[in-house]
Image (cartoon, rainbow, N blue to C red):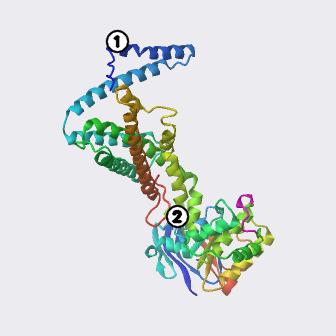
């Protein structure tokens, strides 16, 4: 099992305290827990939006402190729960993301294809200001996927979606993470739909690991 | 050149009739602000009399250190005014950038102005140096105050947008570049607007003073143009510096947003 992230004695204020945690590649890693349990803080740590007060965090074997923070975020892209959609069209949003990560923007056809597979308006020139909450969330997800990061960090990506769209997104993500050593950490109020597709489910409680459940992949269930 | 009219003391006193008029209107409108108007007029009088005597004294000096000391005092006063008038509390790091912006943003254009544009001899000739320094520092002070206020707002209101850009791999500079342009424009607009109305809507104070003192209008205009260009250059440089140096204080060395402002 390849460790994508490894946390050792990582603490962040009183919000998070994790003695040890390994996040592997190749399957959905779902983080769940009550509100205020430290789920989003964990994602922000992994994205280097914040740093541990104490302890160490490794990304694919390198201590995160030794990595260039911007270059790291280009490899590990995060989509927050309420993503910010930049003013302009769907395509402009995507182009801006590519400008930020200094990559060549994708072809229009590729954008259209992904928009269609996520059940979004297929006209990339459509303005974003009329999009619903769920559509904005899917656009942010597409924006991140098109960047082709090594690792995706998603905060409640299905929170604003109905069951049908949740299924579409989860199926896509499960397929995505199974290739090329990719990793996907997803915060979710894990319903059965999400649990069934997760390789690992981490339950946080008051900033501490309450349970690390890996049954979906290997049929083991252990308490951390 | 026509001879300059000297204002006799009783005529000077007669100008205070306008204060009486203002107090009368204040009374009729029941504003209850008569004392404020009176105090403001007395302060203006005392400040100008003191400044007049001080300037007369300085103009008589032939010492570059005295001139530079006055410039230094103006810059310190400008820094104090900017920081004390800000509605929001700002970090010590941002305060340092205000100091750099005032010193660099006003001294460099002023040096160019005195050495190249006016080419005064000596370069520190207080009769030129001090009024020009006053206008340059004063206008830059307004620009920097506007710039800093706007910058603080940007990081409050636009936090989600900046954070989103960071998550997508933007450098801090990329994440705020749109905001920096808007902030720069907002801070220099008063200076640009004053250029637009100049000569049409109003005759600037310095030009009025020169004309009243007996200079030809054309000569006064030449001075006004170069002064305006000097002010524009100084305000632009000072605002640019405070914005470019200032936004960095909102990030740490891990390219993370920090809450120290």
The residue lying furthest to the left in this view is B62
Q: Chain of mark 1?
A: B
**Image side of residue A195 versus residue B3, left or right:** right
Element at label 2: helix
Seen at 49% across and 55% down, the residue is: B259
Q: Tell me where residue A169 appears, x and y as whole percent.
A: 73, 74
Between disc 2 and disc 1, the foreground one is: 1
Describe the element under mark 1 as helix, strand or loop: helix
Q: Residue at x 61, y 80 (%)?
A: A183
Whole-number angstrom distance, CA of label 2 to CA of label 1: 63 Å
Residue B62 to residue B45: above or below: below
**Which residue is tagged 1?**
B10
**Magenta-drawn segment:** A123-130
In this orientation, which residue lies closer to the viewer: B15 or A35? B15
Q: Main secondary structure of the magenta part?
A: loop
Neighbourhood count class around disc 1 (C-alpha, 10 Å): few under 14, some 14–19, many 20 upward: few
Q: Which residue lies at the image location 27% right of the left edge and 31% below the top edge?
A: B55
Residue B261 x, y percent position in the rendering? 47, 52
Residue pictured at 41% horizontal, 51% vertical? B237
Indicate the position of residue A75 as horizontal and vertical percent values.
55, 76
Numbered badge on residue B174: 2
The front one of B48 and A51 is B48
| Residue B192 visible in the picture | yes
């Amino acid at each position: 099992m390849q460790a994508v992230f490894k946390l050792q004695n990582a603490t962040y204020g009183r919000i998070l305290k994790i003695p040890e945690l390994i996040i592997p590649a190749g399957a959905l890693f779902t983080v769940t827990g009550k509100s205020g349990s430290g789920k989003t803080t964990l994602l922000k740590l992994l994205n280097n939006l914040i740093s541990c007060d104490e302890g160490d965090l490794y990304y694919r074997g390198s201590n995160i402190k030794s990595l260039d923070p911007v270059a790291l975020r280009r490899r590990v892209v995060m989509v927050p729960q309420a993503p910010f959609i930049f003013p302009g069209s769907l395509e402009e949003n995507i182009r801006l993301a590519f400008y930020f990560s200094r990559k060549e923007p994708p072809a229009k056809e590729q954008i259209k294809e992904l928009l269609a597979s996520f059940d979004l308006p297929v006209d990339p020139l459509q303005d974003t200001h009329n999009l619903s909450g769920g559509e904005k969330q899917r656009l942010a997800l597409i924006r991140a996927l098109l960047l082709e990061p090594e690792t995706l960090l998603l905060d409640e990506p299905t929170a604003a979606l109905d069951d049908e769209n949740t299924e579409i997104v989860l199926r896509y993500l499960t397929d995505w993470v199974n290739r090329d050593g990719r990793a996907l950490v997803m915060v979710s109020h894990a319903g059965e739909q999400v649990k069934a597709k997760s390789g690992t489910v981490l339950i946080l409680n008051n900033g501490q690991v309450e349970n690390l459940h890996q049954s979906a992949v290997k049929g083991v269930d252990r308490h951390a | 050149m026509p001879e300059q009219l000297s204002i006799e003391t009783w005529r000077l006193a007669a100008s205070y009739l306008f204060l009486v008029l203002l107090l009368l209107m204040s009374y009729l409108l029941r504003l209850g602000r008569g004392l404020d108007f009176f105090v403001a007029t007395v302060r203006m009088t005392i400040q100008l009399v003191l400044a007049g005597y001080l300037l007369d004294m300085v103009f008589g000096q032939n010492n570059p250190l005295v001139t530079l000391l006055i410039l230094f005092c103006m810059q310190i006063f400008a820094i104090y005014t900017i920081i004390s008038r800000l509605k929001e509390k700002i970090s010590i790091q941002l305060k340092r950038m205000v100091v750099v912006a005032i010193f660099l943003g006003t001294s460099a254009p002023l040096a160019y102005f005195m050495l190249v544009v006016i080419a005064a001899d000596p370069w520190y000739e207080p009769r030129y140096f001090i009024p020009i320094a006053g206008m340059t520092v004063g206008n830059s002070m307004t620009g920097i105050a506007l710039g800093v206020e706007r910058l603080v707002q940007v990081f409050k209101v636009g936090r989600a947008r900046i954070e989103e850009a960071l998550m997508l791999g933007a450098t801090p500079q990329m994440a705020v570049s749109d905001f920096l342009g808007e902030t720069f424009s907002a801070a220099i607009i008063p200076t640009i607007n004053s250029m637009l109305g100049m000569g049409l809507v109003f005759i600037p104070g310095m030009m009025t003073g020169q004309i009243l003192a007996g200079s030809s209008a054309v000569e006064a205009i030449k001075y006004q143009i170069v002064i305006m260009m000097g002010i524009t250059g100084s305000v632009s440089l000072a605002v640019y510096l405070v914005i470019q140096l200032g936004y960095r204080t909102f990030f740490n060395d891990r390219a993370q947003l920090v809450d120290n402002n």
